[in-house]
Image: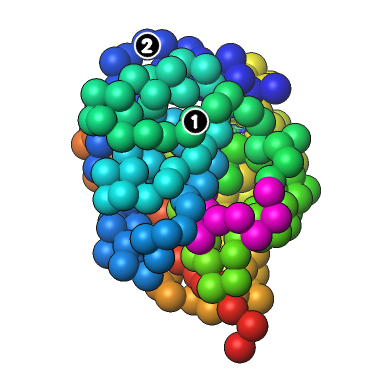
Amino acid sequence: MNQGYWERGYRNVDNLWGFTPNNLLSTYIDLVPKSGKVFDVGIGEGRNALYFAKQGYKVEGIDISETAINRCLLLSKEHNVNINAKVDDIRTYDIKKEEYSLIILSNVLNFFSIKEVNDIITKLKNGLKENGLFYINVFDNEEPSLTIAKERCKKIADFTFYDEENKMYLHYFTQEELENLVADYETISFVKSKFLDVTHGQPHYHSTLEILSKKSRS
Ligand SMILES: C[S@@+](CC[C@H](N)C(=O)[O-])C[C@H]1O[C@@H](n2cnc3c(N)ncnc32)[C@H](O)[C@@H]1O
């Protein structure tokens, strides 16, 4: 159980992830019907949730960290918006069927085993309405911190490790693997990025993949 790892991360700083929503989400916000509900999985302090709530969307979210949820609720009060955020674990969470117009998995999926990833994706797809959007952002197999995982963690597969100290999986996605997770959906946008992250801690590089896809029959 990796709850302790995330709790420590949040308790050590006033704000861990900043306030800027993910670029693809703000670019395509108009594709999400105003009447639709947004579900943010691993909502953190709510940088994406706050953005959608401020635009008038009903927003729900869960996170395994109580500190993150309390901070998200406090921020939503300060910004005069309502976010229904609760402490919960996505691995055991029961999602309402075809309830949401947008589901967000921002920087969350890297911390599970492959089996857990597949189970989470199947579950979340059930929670999406027809024509709903699914946003996933992950570190890929060129992510610089992969080197650290290789040194410090137990290797499970080529890009999957188990961090025994923090009791958590670390999985780095290939492009094909991420695309396969939503192969039955229509791709709206796919972005591969390498960038210097200056939002938290010492500036450091990341290598990420983002996919925004749509659940549609055609
Ligand atoms: C890297 S942070 C990203 C936070 C937020 N999505 C963002 O982009 O700012 C990963 C988040 O996933 C949460 N998390 C990790 N495992 C989880 C689980 N099993 N269920 C729900 N949330 C989880 C962590 O507590 C943390 O807030």
Pick the front one: 48 or 76: 76
Q: Would residue 67 be found to the left or right of residue 168 on screen?
A: left
* Towards the viewer: 199 or 58: 58
Residue at image x 27%, y 64%? 27
Q: Nearer the viewer, residue 149 or 88?
A: 88
In the image, taking residue 153 as reference, residue 198 lies left or right, namely left
| Residue 217 covered by magenta stretch | no
**SS at mark 2 in the image:** loop
Q: Position of residue 70 (x, y in %)?
A: 43, 18
Residue, disc 2: 12
Q: What's the residue at 27%, 50% (across, down)?
A: 55
Q: Amino acid at mark 1?
A: Ala
Give yes or no for contact between labels 2 and 1 (Cβ–Cβ under 8 Å). no
Is residue 33 among what the camera can see? yes
Percent x, y of residue 136: 50, 56
The mark total stands at: 2
Image side of residue 120 versus residue 70, left or right:
right
Give the residue drawn at x 65%, y 55%: 127
Name the residue that disc number 1 marks.
Answer: 85
Q: Which residues are magenta?
A: 96-108
Question: Looking at the image, which residue is at 53% across and 67% down?
Answer: 132
Q: Which mark is residue 185?
A: none
Q: Amino acid at mark 2?
A: Asn
